[in-house]
Image: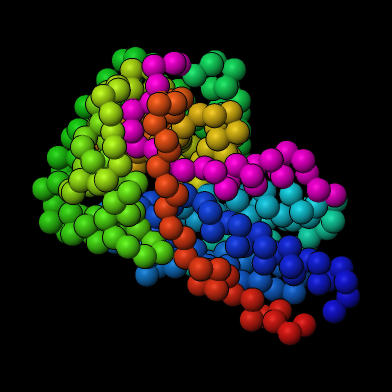
């Protein structure tokens, strides 16, 4: 193997490992990477699908899309450009993406900065501060999340109230479903490398305009007395509702969230309202029926009087990155 080939496989393995920092629904981390001598493959891990909550796999694939974008950025930071094939084989739906045609182009400073943002990005479910987000920051986040048919619509006050009603309805539906509650209990308040530990869950329901998910158990994260009146809400959506669209939605989520992190803006994804068919239809009504909702985002400036919550745990690199095809070369 030449020095260039060795540098490529090292960069691919490092990019796949860095992608493990991506956000995923309930921190399920449902991805596995395979490093090849001249490329990289992303596969979905069905064993970590939320079969009751997400039977169609919408959030499963969206989560993998976030990891895909993380890997793309990590490669760019190391000076590599790749051709990305999404859902390359219809007869192999678990193969979500393949990186091919890699060429060295020089390190991308913006990508290097975003890799740093991956290390500090986290989800803080507590109310945000009373300071509103600057319009320029919202514009930059929206621009980052808008690409390849995915769009981000900032909701006005009336739409936020509609969203609050829909979120409350979704929570009621899910709380009355024993399978959904059992699945949520399995992935929350646990110790280990996946799921949501108690330390990242609020100790009491936060005072928010749009209710967050009821995790069915209190966490240990102090909430405080604040409210989220200065928070902004946005709807991530697109023209179609197929696996490749969910994958691109995850890439858009990652791009917008990393940009928000760079700008000091806190992001909380709200997936409950898209998990229930009836409330997902209500969201589509906000789009006048011309788009398909993928995810709702709450954005705001974190309350400076509280330290941020800890990062959620991550699977070991050997559990998510397969390097057997290049080992020993």
Residue at the image point whose x is 17% and y is 48% from the top: 216
Q: Which residues are magenta?
A: 106-132
Q: Is residue 17 left or right of residue 235?
A: right
User: Residue 91 at x, y = what percent?
Assistant: 51, 70
Colour logic: rainbow
Residue at 85% x, 79% y is 1
Residue 178 on image: x %, y %? 12, 56
Residue 242 at least partly seen:
no
Residue at image coords 64%, 44%: 116
- Given residues 166 and 1, the one toward you in this image is 1
Q: Is residue 55 magenta?
A: no
Q: Does the rendering let one see residue 270?
A: yes
3 to the left or right of 300: right
Tally of marks: 0
Residue 26's place in the image compared with 136, above or below, is below
Q: Position of residue 51 (x, y in %)?
A: 29, 61
Based on the picture, tell me whether residue 130 belongs to the magenta stretch. Answer: yes
Give the quarter of the figure containing the C terminus: bottom right
Q: Quadrant of residue 141?
A: top right
Q: Position of residue 8 (x, y in %)?
A: 78, 66
Which residue lies at the image location 88% right of the left edge and 71% below the top edge? 3
Based on the displayed image, in which of its 4 quarters is residue 180 positioned? bottom left
Image height of 293 relative to 128, above or below: below
Quadrant position of residue 183: bottom left
């Amino acid at each position: 193997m030449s020095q260039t080939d060795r540098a490529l496989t090292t960069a691919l393995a490092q990019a796949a490992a860095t992608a493990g920092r991506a956000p995923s629904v309930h921190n399920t981390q449902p991805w596995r990477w395979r490093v090849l001598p001249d490329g990289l493959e992303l596969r979905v891990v069905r064993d970590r699908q939320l079969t009751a909550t997400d039977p169609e796999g919408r959030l499963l694939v969206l989560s993998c899309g976030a990891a895909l974008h993380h890997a793309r950025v990590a490669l760019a930071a190391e000076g590599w450009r790749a051709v990305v094939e999404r859902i390359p084989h219809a007869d192999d739906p678990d193969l979500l993406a393949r990186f091919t045609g890699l060429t060295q182009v020089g390190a991308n400073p913006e990508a290097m900065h975003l890799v740093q943002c991956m290390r500090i990005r986290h989800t803080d479910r507590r109310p945000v501060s009373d300071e509103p987000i600057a319009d320029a920051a919202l514009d930059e986040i929206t621009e980052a999340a808008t690409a390849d048919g995915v769009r981000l619509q900032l909701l006005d006050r009336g739409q936020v109230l509609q969203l609050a009603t829909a979120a409350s309805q979704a929570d009621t539906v899910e709380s009355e479903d024993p399978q959904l509650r059992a699945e949520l209990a399995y992935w929350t308040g646990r110790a280990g490398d996946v799921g949501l530990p108690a330390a990242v869950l609020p100790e009491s329901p936060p005072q928010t305009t749009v209710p967050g998910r009821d995790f069915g158990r209190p966490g240990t994260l102090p909430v405080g007395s604040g409210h989220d009146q200065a928070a902004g809400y946005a709807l991530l959506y697109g023209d179609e509702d197929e696996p490749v669209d969910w994958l691109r939605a995850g890439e858009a989520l990652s791009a917008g969230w990393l940009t928000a992190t760079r700008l000091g803006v806190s992001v909380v994804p709200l997936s409950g309202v898209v998990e229930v068919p009836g409330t997902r239809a209500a969201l589509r009504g906000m789009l006048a029926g011309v788009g398909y909702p993928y995810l709702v985002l709450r954005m705001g400036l974190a309350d400076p009087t509280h330290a941020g919550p800890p990062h959620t745990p991550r699977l070991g690199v050997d559990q998510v990155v397969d390097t057997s095809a290049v080992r020993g070369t």
